[in-house]
Amino acid sequence: MIAQIAAHVSVSMLPGIGPAKSRKILDSLTSLESFDVFSTVLKCFPSIEIGHSEWHAIWSRSVDKVERIIDQGIVIVPYLSDLYPANLRGLSTPPVNLYLIGRVDSLLSANIIAIVGTRNPDSCIQDFAPSFCEHLSSLASCVVSGLALGCDSIAHIASIRSTTPTVAVLPCGIDKIYPKENQGLAQDIVEAGGCLVSEYEPGTKIQKSYFVARDRIQAGLSHAGVLLQSSLNGGSMHAMKTLASLGRPLATISPPMHLLNADQWAGNVKLINGRPAPLVFDLASDAHSIREGAGILLPKHQNQSVAQSFIQQSLL
């Protein structure tokens, strides 16, 4: 496993090699030995200016880095690993590596749903969403969100209350909880059988572009997505757009009539009026209607006990 991860990290450390080129190299590998990986690099990109001694130094640094990260209790799931979530491979830009704290099997569940929304939900959503999310979470095998304040926090907390594992996707290194106000929630997520995940190496600080990149991973991990509330330009709309591009079911909540033109509901209205048409809940949705909606949203994948057996064997 160390060699597999080191191959991924080494390739990503090469000058001028970004994620897309890294995946091209990784997809071409026939062996994970250092020399063979280097040969594949040269075959894929003959013009790269790097010699054997430089490659050996990069490989050595990669092995050291991987061992340090693992010693911190962080799990690394490389692109070529059997534990890499199949859902993510549907993205046009799947992460080269995933860094996790918590249970890896959370990412491989049979019915994963993303629940996202604004950091500043109005009173309608604050009143309705906790119960709605708890009902919906209890019908899923895992809930994905982004650990942000507001709607994301509501989704994570509801999942924990329904004893459903929840995954928080971070826009920074896995060792830097964002926002700081949710450090306690992050710990609760892990202790409840979920996990924290990031595509960025530990120590990576937040950049503005990382939020949009995080949104695509939330979508990529999920079989379906629910938008609680968003303005037209809210970050959660990125996740909905990615889910739609992947052909995965969408759902949202319709605003009350007197708020149809309110800015904070504009994202929901756009989704409702768009294509593909989402499943629409309203603020009066009860447990029965939520259960019916979940049956439409969540696919019937392989028996979960079979999946769990495979995961346990892979981790041995």
Image (tube, rainbow, N blue to C red):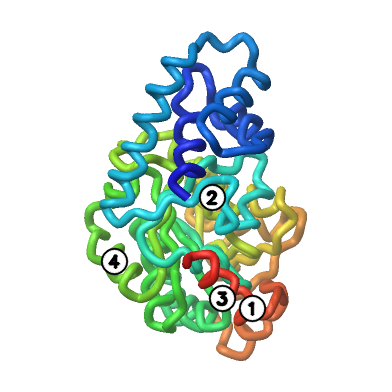
Which residue occupies the foreground of this view, 3 or 175?
3
Tag 1 and tag 2, C-beta contact below 8 Å: no
Image disc number at residue 308? 3
Identify the residue position indicated by label 1 in the image: 306
83 sits left or right of 249 in the view: left
Tag 1 and tag 3, C-beta contact below 8 Å: yes
Which residue occupies the foreground of this view, 23 or 127?
23
Q: Residue flagged by tag 1: what amino acid is it?
A: Val
Q: Residue flagged by tag 2: what amino acid is it?
A: Ile
* Residue at 57%, 51% in the rendered image: 81
Foreground mark, 2 or 3, reads 3
Distance from disc 2 to disc 4, alpha carbons, whole Å, reads 20 Å
Q: Residue 316: horizontal and vertical position, in percent?
A: 47, 67
Image disc number at residue 209? none
In terms of secondary structure, where does tag 1 sit? helix
Q: Residue 58: horizontal and vertical position, in percent?
A: 40, 24
Identify the residue position indicated by label 2 in the image: 217
User: In the rendered structure, which disc, 2 or 4, sits on the residue that comes first in sequence?
Assistant: 4
Other-residue count near label 1 (Cα within 10 Å), few / some / many at <14 / 14–19 / ≥20: few
Residue 45, compared with residue 258, is above or below; it is above
Foreground mark, 4 or 3, reads 3
Image disc number at residue 185? 4
Foreground mark, 1 or 2, reads 1
Distance from disc 1 to disc 4, alpha carbons, whole Å, reads 30 Å
In terms of secondary structure, where does tag 4 sit? helix
Other-residue count near label 4 (Cα within 10 Å), few / some / many at <14 / 14–19 / ≥20: some
* Residue at 51%, 31% in the rendered image: 34
Q: Can residue 261 be seen from the camera position used here? A: no
Q: Can residue 239 be seen from the camera position used here? A: yes
